[in-house]
Every structure is written in structure tokens, then in C-alpha cells.
Amino acid sequence: MGAASITLPHRLGEKLREKAEETGYLPEELGVEFVRKGLNEGLDPEELVELYLSLSDRYFREGEEFLSKGDLLQASEKLWGAAALAVKSVAANEGKKLEKHGGLWGFVENISIVRKDDDLVDLFHIANSLHRNFYENQMGKRSIEVAMRDIKKFMAKLREGLS
């Protein structure tokens, strides 16, 4: 699946970000939903898995870039997004759709039980701390660097279970 991009006027981009935050989506994910519904098109599970993996990788790269520039808040949020989208890719692979933060937690808990891997819960705690840091600005650069390594590990572990 090739990706296309769309440029939105600033006001619409802000509205999309606000609506995404309200609904538990990431902005790009919500944008895909709007376009999909507007065109009356569905996405099969394979397409959703590919979409989520692609966005997850992109968010991770953007997190690395923000961290290298010293923008710790944006790095935190992008790395959180990378982890959340990786979780959504596994859910989509199982034919499930996760929309709220709590749904992510429940799904991670379940797959950690199925896979007998408590590290998944531990690593998701780290991702969640990055999400919280975006709002509270408590973590320093070193903490985010360490967390970024853990997010990479988390994403790799999640991908191990994809068919």
C-alpha cells in the first residue's frame, strides 16, 4: 500500500488534532477514518496492519528527530504514538479495533498473558510515561533517550507476533 499525503489549512489541521485528542485517535489515523468514510471505502485488516505499522515507524523516526533537536515534548509524544500504533497493528491483525487509551492497556495486558511476556506491560508503562511527559514536561533528555530504546524494543516484540 502506497501512502499519499494531504496538506490541510492550519485551522483544519488544528481542528483535526483537537478532534483526534478528544476521540483517542492520532491525527493521521483520524484523517484516514474521515477520508475512508467520506469515500465510503473500507480497509481490510491487512491494509490496517500495514497502515498502523507504517505510521508507527514514521512516528518513531520523527521522535528520534525531535529528540536530536532537543524538543523533548514532541519527541515524547511521537514515541508514545509509535508505541500506540504498534499495539493497534497487532489488534488489527486480530481483527480488532482499539480507539481509547484504556483499550490499548487492556489489549497489551491480554497479549502479554497470551504470549507469556510481562515485558510487554513493562514496556508499555514506559510508553505511557512518555505520553504523560508530553503534558507534564518532567523528563530530561537522558530519560527520553533510554525510553526511546525501550520503545524500539517494544515495537520489535509486538511485530514478532504478526502473521
Image (tube, rainbow, N blue to C red):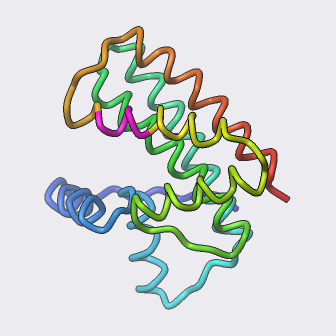
Q: Is residue 45 above or below residue 100?
A: below
Quick one: quadrant of the N terminus?
bottom right
Q: Is residue 43 magenta?
A: no
Q: Is residue 158 left or right of residue 121?
A: right
Q: Residue at x 18, y 63 (%)?
A: 15
Magenta: main secondary structure: helix
**Magenta-colored span:** 128-132
Q: Residue furthest left?
A: 11
Q: Is residue 27 above or below residue 32?
A: above
Where's residue 146, x and y in %? 51, 15
Please name the residue shown 47% across and 64% down the image. Answer: 103
- At horizontal 21% and vertical 37% (from top left) the residue drawn is 135
- Where in the figure is residue 127, as x and y percent of width and height? 47, 36
Quarter of the image where the C terminus is located: bottom right
Q: Along the line of sight, which residue is nearer the eye, 19 or 36?
A: 19
Q: Residue furthest right?
A: 163
Q: Say which of 110 and 59 sits in front.
A: 110
Residue 45 pos. (x, y %): 70, 73
Q: How many marks?
A: 0
Q: Is residue 151 above or below residue 142?
A: below
11, 62: nearer the viewer:
62
Magenta includes 129?
yes
Left-right relation of 99 to 16: right
Quadrant hosting residue 69: top left
Residue 150 figure quarter: top right
Q: Quadrant of residue 130?
A: top left
**For residue 66, side relative to residue 9 (left or right):** right
- Extreme-top residue of the structure: 142
